Image (tube, grey):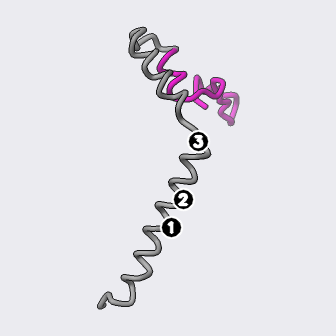
Amino acid sequence: MKLIEKKRVGATIKKVHDIPRTPFERLCKSGILKKAEKKKMQEKIKGVNPFELQEKLKQKILTILKHAAIDEPNMKK
């Protein structure tokens, strides 16, 4: 959530936040992207499965940890 403003009310500070948005949604709302770029990014995002990405990431982390555990006894201090 993006901080929009802060107001001091006596001794406390009241913070006002924007509604939650993804970075892509913020980029689209800003008007910086051209139509072609926006469409290209939308197509790319459509093909992304967060659960698949999470599983791939877990597997890569496990592989790294496995190699670290194998190399650890051989390390000299």
Res 34 → quadrant: top left
- Position of the N terminus, as image quadrant, is top right
Q: Secondary structure at mark 2?
A: helix
What residue would you read off at disc 3?
50
* Mark 1 residue type: Leu
- Position of the C terminus, as image quadrant, is bottom left
What residue would you read off at disc 2?
58
Magenta span of residues: 1-28
* Mark 3 residue type: Pro
Residue 6 lies in the magenta-colored region:
yes
* Mark 2 residue type: Lys
Q: Earlier in the sequence, mark 1 or mark 3?
A: 3
Which residue lies at the image location 58% right of the left edge and 23% below the top edge?
A: 4
* Residue 31, position as x, y percentages in the image: 45, 10
- How crowded pointer 2 is (Cα within 10 Å; few <14, some 14-19, many 20+) is rated as few
In the image, 59 versus 33, the foreground residue is 59
Q: Earlier in the sequence, mark 2 or mark 3?
A: 3
Res 67 → quadrant: bottom left
What residue would you read off at disc 1?
62
* Residue 7, position as x, y percentages in the image: 63, 25
